[in-house]
Image (cartoon, grey):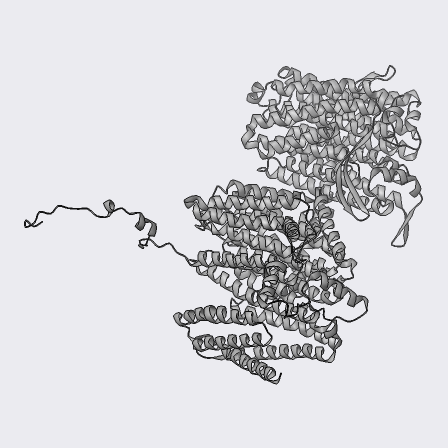
Amino acid sequence: MDTASLTTSLIAALPEVFLACAGIFILMVGVFSGARATHTAMLLSVAALVGALVLVLFGPSRAAFAFNDLFVNDGFGDFMKIVVLGAAALTLIISFGYIRREQLDRFEYPVLLVFAVVGMLMMISANDLISLYVGLELQSLALYVVAAFRRDTLRSSEAGLKYFLLGALSSGMMLYGMSLVYGFTGTTSFTVLADHFAGQAAAGQELWLGALVGLVFVVAGLAFKISAVPFHMWTPDVYEGAPTSVTAFFAAAPKVAAMALVVRVLMGPFGAWVEQWQQIVVFVSIASMLLGALAAIQQTNIKRLMAYSSIGHVGYALVGLAAGTEAGIRGVAIYMAIYVLMTIGTFACILCMRQKERMVEGIDDLKGLSKTHPLMALALAIFMFSMAGIPPMAGFFGKIYVFLPAIEAGLYALAVIGVLTSVVACYYYLRIVKLMYFDEPAEGFDRPVGREVGAVIAGTAVLVLFFFVAPGPLVDGAAAAADAFFAVAG
Amino acid sequence: MIVQTLCFYLFAAVMVASAVMVISARNPVHSVLYLILAFFNAAGLFVLIGAEFLAMILVVVYVGAVAVLFLFVVMMLDVNVAELRQGFLQYLPIGGLIGLILLVELVMVAGFVITAPEVGEAVARVPMPPPEQVTNTEALGRVLYTDYVYLFQASGLVLLVAMIGAIVLTLRQREGVRRQVIAAQIARKRSEAIEVKDVPSGSGI
Amino acid sequence: MIDALIVFLPLAGAILAGLFGRALGDRGAQAVTCGALVVAAALSVVVFIDVALGGNARTTELFTWFDAGSFELSWALRVDTLTAVMFCVVTIVSAVVHVYSIGYMAEDKSIPRFMAYLSLFTFFMLMLVSADNLVQMFFGWEGVGLASYLLIGFWYDRPSANAAAIKAFLVNRVGDVGYALGIAGIFLLFGSVEFDQIFGAAADYQDTVLTVFGIEWHALTVICLLLFIGAMGKSAQLGLHTWLPDAMEGPTPVSALIHAATMVTAGVFLVCRMSPVFEYAPDALTVVTYVGAATAFFAATVGLTQTDIKRVIAYSTCSQLGYMFFAAGVSAYGAAMFHLMTHAFFKALLFLGAGAVIHAMHHEQDMFKMGGLYKKIPLTYGLMWIGSLALVGFGIPGLGVGLAGFYSKDIVLEAAYAAQSAAGGFAFWLGIAAALMTAFYSFRLLFLTFHGQTRADQHTFDHAHEAPRVMIWPLYLLAAGAIGAGAIFYGFFVGDGRETFWNGAIFALSDIIEEAHHVPFWVKALPMAVTLVGIALAWAMYVWRPDLPAAGARLFRPLYLFSLRKWYFDELYDAVFVRPAWYLGEGLWKAGDGALIDGVGPNGVAAVTRSLARRASRLQSGYVYHYAFAMLIGVVALVTWYIVTAGG
């Protein structure tokens, strides 16, 4: 690679390069700036994420392929990067107060999250099995650490350790699958793989069993990252054990990045074998929707509830992927964007659940919230209605956009099960609304909730509630994402 | 040629055997020692295919640094193997069954390759420069620093994150611990460090 | 641009007052919302001159809303004469009510909330009247329903207010279902919900039939009837009217704005807006005529005996809405809109005047505890006279001089007569009867409230006082409208200038209004004659011989009770819908629920779900090796599946 191509490559990866450099810079600032280090580092991190977002949106035009085709830029990647960066910035903003109150304020926290986001961006832009893996590990390693960030408590350490061990197992599976794919095709590049498989499919040949098994292993590893059933087991424990601000982060940005990766791997190199991987996706999707709906009913801890809720949502998003069509991919993109909005809003509310200077996490602590904090109760009710998929909230449209392509693709059973499970899921979402509005108030939460948290809650609630007024930008963006993706994949 | 083949099977057999011993040895110290043995054999395999640089790196880095570090850690931690084995038998039947199924399936996959030779031909070969023209180190350097510079840098980030993580999770600022501050030591002047008292002799204090 | 300003200024006011009410304070919230509305009203007049008088109808596209395949929608403001008229009515009345509320609600605890609701309502109402497609209109339609619900239940600590709010909400749902089905039907038939495309294609579908359950239905009739059900709900027509009198639980300015001048006329507006479709569904129009006429008559009879001052006016509103509907039913849409406009002025005036009386009497609403107030509150007294005269349609038939109601009510009745159909005749004679009763109850109200010996307790009477200026001044504006609006706009709405005025905004196959101008003189004179009779009767019974009403009530006791209990509608609904539902519920609960449902039905399903849920969460043991094992099993299962299906 000569200097010129290196320059174009660096420009092509400008948001990632910028964010990585910013991470190192913030680390230095944190090390050398004494008592206010955390606050400064948090502010700088938010600024860095926003900066990267600006670069994605308005930066110089970036080449489609870079670094010897290890890295790809397309509309799909840009859309997902925007969602990831936005989600990461918002989750950092809402955790300002939390980490200060909970004595988690060490400057490494935002630095690790910034590096995790770098990893996510690399995942989204991966065009090679190896760059996929390296990006994934960068992200995961940072997340393992932040999960155990409250190292003095047993639960947090346990969460970090569990996440690490199971993550290592899933990485191992994925690497094994990659080695099978490489062994059978002799390449790790997505572009070459896609051409190869497309040619094979055009010639009417069957997919080699070895590559297929490799694919299964790769998908299993990826399914772990999006916490799809049966690779979801870590989710509830880690969500519950990790500090709440970390849980909020887990539920938002990494999910989007991993989902983008799943879409990229399945639609990119394996795009020609939709019928083959469709079966896995359908199975995983149904299992996730069922478990997400059923297991959440029994929960009393709101973070565990959100864990199962996120499992269910991943199942719904996978419905769109299972269709394997352009409309389906558009649905996945829309669903993930809406999911992120609802999740961040909900976690912003959860971060406000403090009584007498201590965090509480019981669902029962929300009783009578409408009397003590009417506006927060209203916002949380909006999020719950939206997650349950009740019109005219955004969540309803998200579900529409994934179910319709599935029906068009002839996956009737999948769509029907999806609708049924969302009815079951209504139960626990609406239970929260009922607790807030119809039960006698428990002890109210501490005030004030913090200006930035309030602003995020209000903003996301308004977006979720009034999504139906102007769905145009998001839908168009997602359509462009799916379209660009299909154009690249052929 | 025959020597090479024999060496290959020797190294491979010893390596697999020691790998099995790594996970089945009762004493964790023994496990680490078997691991070192496996590394040596892997290095031998590398030499056989002409990758002498990789072989040396393997010995220097893995045997010399990583495995020895392991050994220290294992010796410092008092791992009770018997406790770890609890419940092993309880899960053995079903675990064994799953393992067996997986094994059979993977063998089927491998068998599929043997029975369908066209697969091997269809594999896209990565063009490799002939060993006579390019030295081992040069080839490695080109791959690492030119072709895959992106991954090289990204791996650097991964290591940085690992380091930050290790520090964050373990480093504690303890109160009341006296530390050596070299800069302060060097910067001290004679006048600050000692005080000359004029003690009159013979009168006591 | 100016159209968008009119629509969004009230929204801006509502948001400011609603979200930052605490920061703005009471004064600030009032200033923001009133200022926004006054500006909007001024702009509306400009738009009216430009669009209605200048003939510059236009559609402003704001942005694309939905773009999902064949279903494409955009937010657009359609401003033609119909919309311009409604803009004026809505913003002027709303501005008046906003200013009036400053005085009326002065002692309330949550002024910013009230002002925000009022402005929010205005925004939705403007959205409704400026909609360019049925879905956007539905958005406004539901929005005004919501705002109305919030305002009726504004004093949420009163159980009766809450009950009234819920009743209004539920009854309106019935209508909304009809409306939503109508929209669906239109989309099915026309493949679009945009007005331009619907109106353009309406003539092509005039003979289309739908086959449902083996019976052939005329498609447009079905659609129009469904839409009309929606209109009935919102405009409180016979059958779905029960919520309107109860809605008087809300603060009086709300009654004036929502339940007299604007929201309840949305149904009339809908029928006029959809006139190009209704014209091709003559059967539906006949139904509209009958329902409107029946409502006009029914509500007037109930108004005769009510004792609550606001309820009398409420039933009067209901009755006048009936007039508007049967005018629309005989294709005299211009007359309907004309009556809508004049009615908005004098009915808002009456309501706000009644509010001033209630204010003076310390929130006493029973007319039999008033009387003799004309000395105490002469300004209000005068204004109520103007309002009542306008309502009864006082004027001189031969010369064609009178107050606003005189012009609009007469043209409505003349159009009904000129229709020369069974429905038209029915409507005409019931309308005449209703006019008689309107005169009676209006003057009964005046005489009971202001004349004779006071029946109020001495303390209240002594402290009765004229309302503050901020409440009286807005009324002058309405009074001016009640006096002059008829004379000024007669020519434009239904007179010779109507063709250029409406400029295609409403559509009628035959020009019924032209025929209405050539009816015999007795038709023109009859309403005035019966009105005078009604006034005389009222005078006789409540001023000349105050013992007559009691004697009359004794003599015609069944009739009296029938009217007093509002034709037993509430009891009927209670007996037909509420009680059976309750009994059914109880029966099902006892017989079905215990045995069937708890066993195998939904509850059984719920039980199974719960036990499944328990199992699902028990999977979560907390041991890492369990988790790892589950992952392995998952992978092995998937691999096995592929090997079996692909390889075997």
- Is residue B128 positioned above or below C391 on the image? below
Q: Which quadrant would residue C243 be assigned to in this image?
A: top right
Residue situated furthest front in the rendering? B133
Relative vertical location of residue C202 with respect to residue C343 in this rendering, above or below: below
Residue at 74 percent across and 27 percent down: it is C2
The answer to whether C377 appears left or right of B189 in the picture is: right
Quadrant in the rendering for residue C316: top right
Q: Looking at this view, is B55 or C182 the one in front?
A: B55
**Residue C621 visible in the current orientation:** yes
Q: Is residue C183 left or right of residue B152?
A: right
Query: Which one is nearer the viewer's eye here, A308 or B83?
Result: B83
Q: Nearer the viewer, residue A209 or C439?
A: A209
Of the 4 image quadrants, the one containing the N terminus of chain B is: bottom right
Snapshot quadrant of residue A415: bottom right
Q: Residue at x 73, y 25 (%)?
A: C347
Give the image location of residue A52, x and y in percent.
Answer: 60, 46
Where residue A337 sits in the image (x, y, percent)? 65, 50
Point 66% across, 38% down: residue: C149
Q: Residue A161: percent from the left, percent from the top?
A: 49, 63
A295 and C349: which is toward the camera: A295
Total number of numbered discs in the rendering? 0
Vertical relation: B169 (above or below) C74:
below
Name of the residue lying farthest toward the left: B202
Q: Residue A383 at x, y = what percent?
A: 61, 48
